[in-house]
Image (cartoon, rainbow, N blue to C red):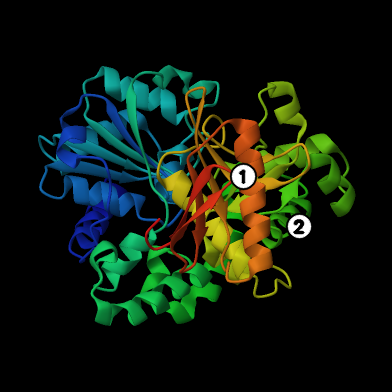
Amino acid sequence: MKTIILNQRRERDELMSRPYLKRRSGQDADMLLSSHLIKLITGPRRVGKSTQALLMLRDKNFAYLNFDSQPLLDAWDANLVMRLLDDVYPDYDYLLLDEVQNLDSWDLWVSELYRMGKNLVITGSNAKMLSSEMATVLTGKYLQVEMLPFSLEEFFDWNSLTLHTLAPEEMTNASVLADDYLRNGGYPEVVASRQLVRSYLETLFDAIVWKDVARRHRVRNVSDLNDLAMYLVSNCCNPVSANELTEELGFSSVNTTKKFMDYLHEPYLFYYLPRYNNKLRLMKKAPRKVYVVDNGFVAAKAFALSDNLGRLFENQVFVELVRRGFDTERTLFYYRSRTDKEVDFVLRKGSHIECLVQVCYDMTSAKTEKREVDSLVECAGELTCGKLFIVTNDDERVIEKDGYTINVVPFMKF
């Protein structure tokens, strides 16, 4: 066990010696570390959670355990590990536990460390790691930081451009970069090596489905699970229902489909957006729209997907809204009017509809503009909301319609 911990210390030191892009975050690292609460960094695999934790702790005296290590899990002995950590990291102030959800009964052990007064930073790649029955022992004991792939702003940072202060001579390069981001996404490993997008993300997608989902939940019919994942990534931005998916894919039961859909959300791979309705019962029955955490997965895995920039664009706006803290349980929805007109995103604050966001990649056609504006205005009337946006690729203006003011905003400014 001591050899494993020493090897992981060398791994920690090697990781900290590398140059990294500082991620943009609303969280103050020093303020987080000063809290006695557990600092939990969650998000999909390979988005930089471990890097973020290491950067937070770079100038601190901290111990490190990486649970994405089978030798550590196979030889696990909690009491022995704690004694060896004191030996390998004398008088450490913080303890970083990386991908801790891989450890059986991890939350009980973490809760015990918390009671011992350890200042903990932990990372995990499972959206439900704190909502299981077992994890209720941590209620009220943690602060959560959620990470996603690079935002457009961070992608520009990587390419030495500042998104919100672009000079006129930088606009052409900025447009090329924005299009690249739209088509290939923002996974840190591939932003510097675009030729690796498809091979890298195809492998990562398969690893999430087979390792993080199938193995974790002991799924016996993995081919059905994989078929569902492929169907969802190929139909991103479309409404889906468990009943229709069960019939379409020939699954044995609707319950199996619902279970598999939940499993595929847990590692932050897919999100399901509900249709807004004041009556919760009706909202639960309506089809949900499916989104994927990064456009790069669509490029890498979608089956026979045409070059549909509109869907990629809508998916990109959805992920940006999630990045800003909106969630598909309480504050983010789509809506269909009584005459079946649709608005892409309803943003709610408390019981109040804050604004409506329509997404249209190219609105140069008068027919397209009329369709998008009419849908937005009709939905605004039914939802009694006056703050309206249409996000486009590069169009910027104000539209007045039936007493409503609609701000048309390019994505780079949105």
Choose mark 2 or mark 1, whichever is in front.
1
Report the front residue among 28 and 345: 345
The residue under label 2 is: 227
Residue 288, picture quadrant: top right
The answer to whether residue 49 shows anywhere in this view is yes
Q: Amino acid at mark 1?
A: Val
Which residue is at the far front?
Answer: 403
Q: Cα distance, mark 2 to mark 1?
A: 38 Å
The image shows residue 279 at horizontal and vertical percentages of 70, 22
The amino acid type found where label 2 is placed reads Asp
306 w.r.t. 186: above or below: below
Residue placed most toward the observer, 336 or 153: 336
Assign the C terminus to one quadrant of the image: bottom left
Residue at screen point 54% across, 29% down = 330
User: Is 289 in front, or is 373?
Assistant: 373
Q: Which residue bears the numbered disc 1?
A: 377
